[in-house]
Amino acid sequence: MAKTITCSYENSDQLYDFIHENDLGEYPNLLVQVYSSSTNRTFLIQLQSDIKNELPYATIIGCTSSGEIIEGRMAENKVIVSFTHFEKTELKSLLLHQSTYQDSFELGKAIAGTLLTFDTKAIILYSAGTQVDAQSVLDGIHQSNQGFVIAGGLANGINDEPSVFTGEEITSSGIVAVALQSDQLVAEVFSHSKWTDISRPFHITKAKDTIIYSIENKKPIQILTKYLGKAFVDRLPISGFEFPFMIDEKERKVPVFIKSILKNGAIEVNRKISEHQEMTLAFSDIEGEMKSSLSNLKYIEKKQIETIFIFSGMARKQFTHAFTVNKLEMLQNITATNGFFTNGELIGAPKEKPVLLDHSMTYLGLSENTSQKRLDQKQRFKYTRTTSMKTLSSFIQLMQSAQLDLQLLNENLKVSEQYHQSLFNTNSDIILSIDIKGRIKNTNPAFEKVLGYNSHIMIGKSALNLIQSEDVPRVRMYFNKALKGKEQFLNVMIQPKHGEANLHQIKLIPILMNEECLGVYVVCRNISEQKRIEEKITELSYYDHDTGLPNRIKLTEQLENMLAKAKKKKRILAVLSIDIDRFKIINDSLGHFAGDMVLKELAYRIEKVLPSGAYLGRFGGDKFTVIVSKEVMVEEVLKICKLILKEISKPIDYKGRDFFVTASIGVSFYPEDGMDEHELLKNADIATNRSKNHGGNRITFFSNEMNEHAVSRFELESYLRKALQKQEFYLMYQPLIDLETGGIFGSEALIRWNHPKLGLVSPADFIPLAEETGLIEEIGNWVLRTACIQNKKWQLQGHRNLSVSVNVSAYQFQQPGFIKEVKKALNESKLDPCYLTLELTESTMLDNIGYSIQTMELLQKLGVKVSIDDFGTGYSSLSYLKNLPINTLKIDRSFINNLRLNTSDIAIVKAIITMGHGLAVKVLAEGVETKEQIELLKELKCHYAQGFYIHRPLQIADFEKGLEKPTTLLN
């Protein structure tokens, strides 16, 4: 039996418990597969070690991923470990680096030569790195042996390059593979990816490798904009997964996805393209894929499949999310289903050439139970078709039908008179021939069939009888133009004998003989359904898919129109920018699907309380915009804003749980705050940001001071980017006192910025800005190096045991190269690591507790000390404190400010100090400002202190004086 169990890796202890609870160490043929959302190499190496230590004889392969599948469910930002025990199958694995081989074809041959034997039934491959040509690897394997199945995928990573690994090695440019060898193993592969053409063929007129420079002698960007619209182009390359090109490649059609748009209007695609190739636009054939999938599921159910490994294209998480979720659930109902979302899927059946696919769902089914029959427990496989899926299916069918009809019409209009007559009689469109006076001379069968009129009775009568009276002047005008020898096109309502009038596309074709017009052919096509499709396309272009509200483009256009009317009638307009506070928490905790449902509910609530004349749109993400055009007074607008905040703050029920959100609102007025739509939207957004910066759940009216603040902030950012280069930063050092001895044992390095124009800039102003822009990493590294060098100088001056503390921002601490920068600072300064303390806030560590603990442990191994700054202000301190490898707790100044014998703060401070003693860590009180506080801290046996009572931060020279005469610091 091939049995798979799976866990989500959290830490070494959890993995150890899982392995031992399931007796995994007892299995001789154990395949361990790892799908890791983390690309951090240090983490991956530790993970390898954790598994190898507990399962030294297991076969381990794994890769990084941007989406995992565990027991038939999608997962995000997880590390999934699956354990598959084989009773009769032997395992053989390897890792090969691309750089070792001449090309990827040779690498594939090496895999075949090393792994394949006569009883190899399956190979699982994971590939990493752009240097690896996965298709060439498959070709190399296929040339050597063809009697087995191949499955796998291309690794990916969100913030770093992807990697693949075994239990001993790891590479970001190579292949890992495992061969399953047994004559009793059943292995089958399946793949689902169906596309259908929805456009006429296009001819590539200029291309090289993966770049298409022109299509039918036009820039590709022009073709895409014309047929799919600007909104599609603006969303590239993401939208390219919705409408790929289809090309013929070696007797099969393959999808070609757009990777990027070049500045010259060319496009880069994911496959090599040749000039003069023909291609069409395509869309996912969801119905066809469902049918194929259901048939496949029934087949799998009848087989003795015991475990399934999934390798699914990344785009399926977004564009066919509901379908994918449904499919995974049904597979899990059959047997254990695990895997990951790939950057390309590898698949090969026995005797067939293996291929690299895109946007597909491939999977490998394995079983060793060839003799045992599956129990008769038939599942009911059924896909849930959403409304949007049904609409799209109808839309595609209509597009295909309309495209085929248009092609047929355009081709037949160019053929001979004999072929034309055949077309006249058999065409499903209505065709009339009329003389120069507009009388009907002939009709085709479709005329009688579609309109219900007797053709013989209508002969000789005016064709104008078929249209509504109000359209007669316009039709007569086009008819007269056609008599002059030019084809004419128009849309007009035609009334059948029975039923409602329908919109028809009319083509008037002059009947010419010896340059004399003898009459006109009239070709009529019912385009009522096509018109509805066009309106649907317009809706998709101008309206938000999730909420149905006008999108940014439509709302901006509407504001422009309303402004024009307001200017003409001298009225006031108000623009409300609504931003949902901390909405990212809902997306992160519940998933984006749930987030979309919440946004839809919020849109409904906002719209419900708006007065008449108000216009609501979704500006993007979690932002909404309201235009108020009636009774635009401050009091009324404020009342509307309060109603919106009240509705939004009501609990939102999702799957039986209540969630609460708030919003920030900013308001701008025309004409006071702007004369055009762009300025009004910008200023409303500035006001919203002010609301958010003050904690959210509030209303802010725009003022010119805000705009000035935004400009000032932009200017400050510009100065900040050059401050380090211009050496405008310097450090001050605040003494740290040992309360038992009264002596100085170290200092805290504090950055200061002296700008030549602005003067001294407060850290409270520039540190948050540096964190937001990412400059904090470079600035923080400078502080670290400078503080270490200065502290070493003081040690060489005779203060041998002096230490220095340096604050580390959350952004700096989370960078992969942080440990490297610490080592660099120590090496450059030659400072012993034990004299360096790094101060971290609680929020810094709790953002990613697993990663934080790992990094702190590495710092401890270096000999560097770790301190928790502002302790007591975090909400999860106690739950994690016992697991944190730290040396010092710094009591937040908010508890020290009111420290007196009769205050509750003394109980809190005492508890923290007692806890510190219990955990064998030092406790430092910051913000000491009175002698009474010093005495109380001594009595409570606090180890260290700092604050203005001892001394404010000092320049280097002043600090050195304090070192020579430490008693002056307490005066």
Image (tube, rainbow, N blue to C red):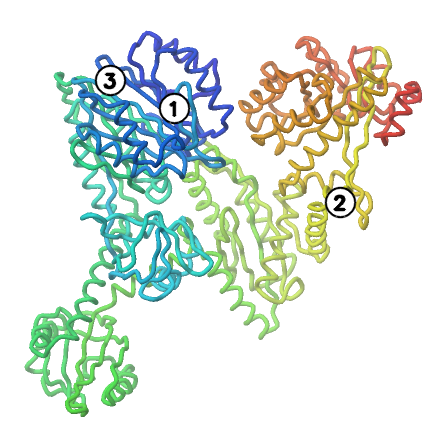
- Closer to viewer: mark 3 or mark 2: 2
Q: CA distance from mark 1 to mark 3?
A: 17 Å
Q: Mark yes or no: residue 797 visible.
A: yes
Q: Residues within 10 Å of mark 1 (few under 14, many from 20)?
A: many
Which of the two labelled residues, at mark 1 and mark 3, occupies the earlier sequence position? 3
Q: Quadrant of residue 939?
A: top right
Q: CA distance from mark 2 to mark 1?
A: 48 Å
Q: Quadrant of residue 474?
A: bottom left
The amino acid at mark 2 is Lys
- Closer to viewer: mark 2 or mark 1: 2
Q: Is residue 470 above or below residue 647?
A: below
Residue at 38% x, 11% y: name it. Answer: 56
Residue 726 is tagged as 2
Q: CA distance from mark 3 to mark 2?
A: 65 Å
Residue 2 is tagged as 3
- Left or right for 657, reference 950: left
Q: Secondary structure at mark 2?
A: loop
Quadrant holding the N terminus: top left
Q: Which residue is mark 1?
A: 34
Q: Residues within 10 Å of mark 3 (few under 14, many from 20)?
A: some
Q: Nearer the viewer, residue 413 or 841?
A: 413
